[in-house]
Amino acid sequence: MKTLIWTLPTRIFHWLLALGFTTTYILGDFEEIINFHFAFGAFVSVLILFRLLFGFIGPKYSNFRDFPIGLNHQKAFIKNYFSKNNYIGHNPAAALVMLTILLIGLLCGISGYLLTVDGNSILNMIGNNELLEDMHEVLANVFLGLVIMHLLGVLSDAVFHWKTGTLTSIFDGYKNVEAENAKLNIFQMAFSVLWFVIPFIFFYLAFGLQPNKSQENNKYKNERLRYDDDDDD
């Protein structure tokens, strides 16, 4: 028997997040097109913010109330992983990784935004933005590590619990289990429309952001230091 576990908004979010984060991460190394990094970063951040809200108002399986993140769930999941899978939506490990991805992704977006704002009070308190730059980079790498963990978990589930259809459910929303179908009400549908429109608006707005002066000065200093080191050689 097939059961609808992941509704269309959840699946759209999944693939937009995958595309958005991958693009943002890669573009972070290209200073000449840094505006695209800003734009995709804003897109991902707003997308995540709406997913966090959806976790409180969304349907069964996508709602945080359905996330088995407790310690007892984690122990039972590890103990019985190779013998059975009693979890319809997210299993305990996947739920924990997913929540961490959302929180780390949001913090990464916030730190990235603060780095683009001139005269920011937080940067002034720090004295310079090097700490914030390091934090932003660490958060991005942690995000990447969590994504890799998520992918390994999906592949592992596809091998050891292939009958459940977890891998294919990412595309069609259905698992081979007998349970209650996930359903969207009118409010959740209306919310989903905003969810997938507003991130594109922020993408457009963020594309017009410019690196703040302290970033440009630090970049100039680093380039100057490298130039001086080359002269000394």
Image: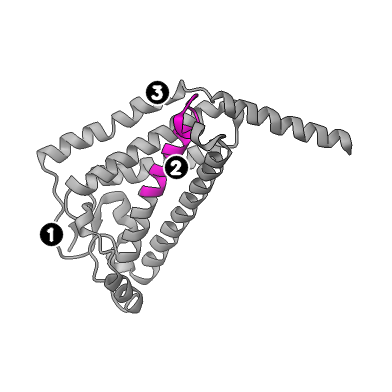
Q: Residue at x 55, y 42 (%)?
A: 131
Q: Which mark is residue 208?
A: none
Disc on the earlier residue, 2 or 1: 2
Q: Residue at x 65, y 30 (%)?
A: 219
Nearest to viewer (mark 3 / mark 2): 2
Q: Which mark is residue 108?
A: 2
In which quadrant of the rendered view does residue 207 lie? top left
Number of residues whose C-alpha sits closer than 10 Å to that of mark 1, classed few (under 14), some (14–19) or many (20 or more): few
The answer, for residue 61, to whether it is visible in the render is no
In the displayed image of the protein, which residue is found farthest to the left?
186
Q: How far across and down, in percent of the image, does residue 137 sit? A: 54, 44
Number of residues whose C-alpha sits closer than 10 Å to that of mark 2, classed few (under 14), some (14–19) or many (20 or more): many
Q: How far across and down, in percent of the image, does residue 89 sit? A: 24, 60
Q: How far across and down, in percent of the image, does residue 87 sit? A: 24, 67
With 48 as the anchor, is 109 left or right in this view? right
**Of residues 70 and 129, the one drawn nearer to the viewer in this rendering:** 129
Q: Mark 3: which amino acid?
A: Tyr
In which quadrant of the rendered view does residue 90 lie? bottom left
Disc on the earlier residue, 1 or 3: 1
**Of residues 145 and 134, the one drawn nearer to the viewer in this rendering:** 134
Q: Secondary structure at mark 3?
A: helix
The residues tagged by marks 3 and 2 sit, at their Cα atoms, a distance apart of 19 Å
Q: Mark 1: which amino acid?
A: Glu
Task: Judge whether 53 appears above or below 201 on screen.
Answer: below
Q: Secondary structure at mark 1?
A: loop
In the displayed image of the protein, which residue is found farthest to the top?
208
Q: Which mark is residue 204?
A: 3
Question: What is the magenta range?
Answer: 103-122
The residues tagged by marks 2 and 1 sit, at their Cα atoms, a distance apart of 36 Å
